[in-house]
Amino acid sequence: MAAPPDPRLFAGGRATRHGIDSLSAAFVEVAKKGQASSGHHNENYLLPLTEPVADQLRRPAGTTVTVRVRRTEALPVVIRTWRNEAEILAAVKGVLPHAPECLFHSERFAIHSYVEGVPLSSVCGNGKPVDTLLVDALADLLAQMTRVRRGALPPLPSVWPHSNTDSRGFLRALAHLADEQIRKPNWTVFGGLFAALGIPEDALLRFAERVPAMTRRPYSLLHADLHRDNLILSYEEGVPPLICVDWELATYGDPLHDLATHLVRMRYPTHQRPEVIHAWEKAMRKVRPAAVAGLAKDLQHYIAFERAQSVFPDVMRAAGSLVGSFTQKRLDEATRAVRRAVEAAAEPLRLRNVPGERETEQALFRWWASRSDRVGAGLDWALRAFEWQPDSRLPEHPDFPSTAVRAALVAEGEAPADRVFKGTAHLNTVVMVPGVDFPVVVRRRVPDFCRREPSYLSEHAVLRAIDESSAEVAAPRVLALGESYPKDSFTIHTYVGPRDIGRPPSHPVNGLLPHEADALVDQLCALTRVDYERVDPAAGEGGFHRWLREQLVLMVRELPKKSHQLARQLGLPDADNLQQILARHEVRDRRPALLHGDLNPWNLVRRDDDLALTIIDWEMALVGDPLYDLVRHMHLTPTRPEIRDRMFRRWEAKLEPRYTRGWRKDWRVYRWIEVVRSAYIDLDRLVTGASLDVPNVRRAVDSYAMTLAAATSALGVPSRPTANPYLARVLA
């Protein structure tokens, strides 16, 4: 809390004009006298004027004034159109004479006239319905603001729309200002936390791009922060029932923005919202009828913006509440606050995979643990922040001892956003550890993630087997495996991206170049030299294709009810019929080998040496027919016919016949299975919305119409377009 002005300047002693002018230098210990309350960027103190100061402010001695002290340590979490509240109050005075008057202002603080009354919040808290007479008074108050002349207000920033009726331009300007004034100044400290929560750096800019055409409405003065704390219930005769204070966030634009922020920040019960909107429309029609044009269509866009931009201050305030006084109770409260903010912003910002309670709690704890002043929370919590329990399945790595693991966990929480990569199943954070001359990536599994395609082997065991085999396979090395507080499992791998770790990795998303195709084939061939029995002792020769069919049928059987219903309506067979159809095809048994199992382009990272590509994300690794890995890659990655033929020729030439015999006939069976698998999986993703923000998933579902046609053709069943409401989404 900021210290108030020295109360001696108000409560006694001598004061001169010079004394008032130098008040900004007179900050001392927090005054025991007077009442204090906090605003966005101010601490407000109620103090009586002494005679010398009262004379100079032209007020009677003993008059109570509000001293607003700027909180220099406050986070920038609001949009400001103008910097000087005094100029706003001067413009408002002629229309709203009972609003506060600025008696004195400086860079550090200001003195305002005191508004007699009590805040609405003290008699009618958030969530409670507001009396109908007060709702009407509020609507009249908002309508009266339109009478403030544009010429009386301070100049507008250069980013403002040129037209004073451009509603769409105003909303887009607000989104850009929120990005510039709220997100950017705080991104260095909080960017990694937002990335961990799945909120991208350009979320507000994308929102601005999506603002649709809107009805033109005449601009007017807007309070822009009209909530229950800023509304004073007066108890004097001849004074309006409600007076609004704290005009520091006032702006000039579409009146619908004021209504939207008021609706969201007042936290009316749901049933009262229509009443408030109707009262606003009725009051505005009397004063400025053009302001209600397009109300029913456009109000939702401003409400969406309020929820979208609020995620940034709400998350930062919740995280900041942990610093210096950490307790489990505070962590629980912060977790709930962050979840509410992210859930509210999910639709307007088009966020996918909103983190659950456990994931949110873990992200907040890691962020707090990395703060340099975390020791203020007490020794026990500070020590717990660095604790980790090694997994006995992986011994300590000679290149990465326990102390390095602890340092990596500390660095993880303070990593900038451009080193945090959130995928469908994992949160990956790239860090540098003191004393270690290579970057590492801390991988944490997303707690609530449910993969339709199961994992069969432990990724750390697969990577360890590859590393110890000396096979020419470019894969990360696993350095540590364990659990940190609170029950948060992690793995640490070597990082295989660019040397500049702030630059994102490059993936062959449009298909492999010829030398990359050769390199990938060489690495798949090298996998045959890895001892697969180390990771899957039960693996043996024969039966892979039959096992693969059974796994596909089992996956279809376990799809949710809605996915089953739509699959049936589109002509895809149920699990029993699918099993019969799949049984018509057999493939020849070949020598098994370790397979990656998911060679989509985003699991291939380009590199600058002869290996050309590093293969990452081995969680779907399995032991089986080497032909399957190659064919599945061609299904998941755009592959031109000449590249496909090149890969097959090289693959056949480099492997012994026991791995390749009969492949020319069998590769089409595997391709057929993968098309059918995609028809079910991508349909389920469309129905459930799972993982749609992941690039390889997004590309797959965008071409679902072709996948469905190919699958029904391969299965020999007719497709059946229906009027099902999901169908438009599927085939869009």
Image: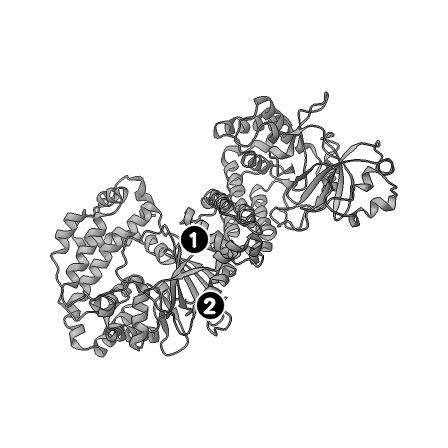
Residue sitting at x 68%, y 47%: 71
Decide which of 719, 184 is in the foreground and name it: 184
Residue 284 seen in this snapshot: yes
Q: Which mark is residue 403?
A: 2
Q: Secondary structure at mark 1?
A: loop
Give x and y (percent) for residue 152.
74, 39
Give x and y (percent) for residue 93.
74, 33
Q: As drawn, is 383 to the left or to the right of 470?
A: right
- The residue where tag 1 is placed is 486
Decide which of 283, 393 is in the foreground and name it: 393
Residue lying farthest to the top in this orientation: 237
Q: Indicate the amino acid at tag 2.
A: Thr
Q: Quadrant of residue 147?
A: top right
Give x and y (percent) for residue 196.
46, 55
Q: Indicate the amino acid at tag 1.
A: Pro
Q: How is the image coloured?
A: one colour
Real-space CA distance between mark 2 and mark 1, rounded to the nearest whole angstrom:
19 Å
Q: Quadrant of residue 604?
A: bottom left
Considering only order in the chain, which callout, 1 or 2, is on the residue closer to the N terminus?
2
Q: Residues within 10 Å of mark 2 (few under 14, many from 20)?
A: few
Decide which of 354, 253 is in the foreground and name it: 354
Q: As drawn, is 229 to the left or to the right of 536?
A: right
Decide which of 38, 178 is in the foreground and name it: 38
Residue 520 seen in this snapshot: no
Residue 474 higher or lower than 367, as above or below:
below
Give x and y (percent) for residue 377.
55, 52
